[in-house]
Image (cartoon, rainbow, N blue to C red):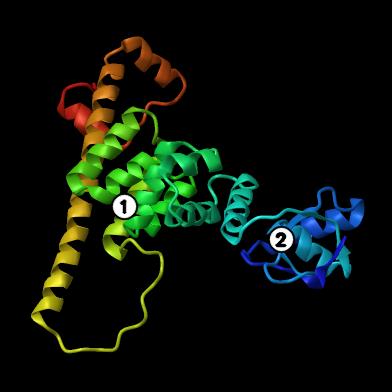
Amino acid sequence: MIPLDQISVVNPRERGQKKFRQIAKNIANIGLKKPITVTPKPGSKDKFLLVCGQGRYEAYQTLGQDEIPCIVVDVSESKLLLMSLVENLARRNPSSVEMVHAIGALKERGYSFAEIATKTDLNVGYIRGIIKLIQRGEERLVMAVERGQIPVSVAVTIAVSDDHDIQRALTEAYESNDLRGKRLLAARRLIEKRQTEGKSLRRGTRRTKSAVSSKRLLQTYQAESAKQRLVIQKSKLCETRLLFVVSAIRQLVEDKKFVDLLRSEDLDTMPAYLATELSRKGCLT
């Protein structure tokens, strides 16, 4: 049992209030199931540094307790930070923002991709991809990966490719069943926002008005051109889908039994565009 005021948190992290209230309520109802872990503070006889268990430590403070059960280990400060990071990873869903930052922190401390994968129990390819995105400042793509909107391999391809390669990557992801339905639409919206608003999630500070320059005009023109290219790409995609639908419907309406079945169920109408296209091709009578 160690007094709370003798323990310092050296690697603090934010947590959701809902989750914290749940921790405090559980401790109040059934007690502390697992002691926190501390290490003696260098140069002090009765002070300790927290290794693992910040939530439990803060819950005890909230509940008005003076002491908390502890497991005391003797580790260096660098090992303490590593243990804290790995423990946070192990206790979280691998798709959390904090997990991504922790992976970046481990890389900055000199650990290899394989070592990070071993310590965090994650795939080496995932680790390599996430770190590449972090190093390139791709905050928007990192967020999409950790939310499960796109696979990390697709995110890396987007980060290092031009528009043509990005479209190819999306097509391959669709064909391999990695991106379908809502995830595919979310990926397209993400690419558009990245192209128009940049890699970072942070909004820039408001700029004061400045004189118009040729550089600013060129930048504005390029931005608008990029938007127009996106519109063209979308229209081409819609055109391809419509051609596919017309082709599929044309094959179906050539089956007289299928047409009779639709009519018997009062399903004998269709969108004007489809009716016009099929009539033009001589498929409707």
* Residue 150 seen in this snapshot: no
Res 69 quadrant in image: bottom right
Q: Please tell me which residue is depicted at 17% across the width and 72% down the height of the picture.
A: 220
Q: How crowded is mark 1: few (under 14 residues within 10 Å), some or many (20 or more)?
A: many
Q: Please tell me which residue is depicted at 55% across the width and 38% down the height of the picture.
A: 121
Q: Residues within 10 Å of mark 2 (few under 14, many from 20)?
A: many
Q: Which residue carries the number 1 mark?
A: 191
Q: Which mark is residue 119?
A: none
Q: Please tell me which residue is depicted at 42% across the width and 26% down the height of the picture.
A: 267
User: Answer yes or no: do the residues labelled 1 and 2 have beta carbons within 8 Å?
Assistant: no
From the viewer's side, name the closer residue of 273 and 205: 205
Between marks 1 and 2 in the image, the one whose residue lies nearer the viewer: 2
Amino acid type indicated by mark 2: Gln
Q: How far is disc 1 from disc 2 in space, using C-alphas?
A: 38 Å
Q: Which residue carries the number 2 mark?
A: 54
Tally of numbered tags: 2
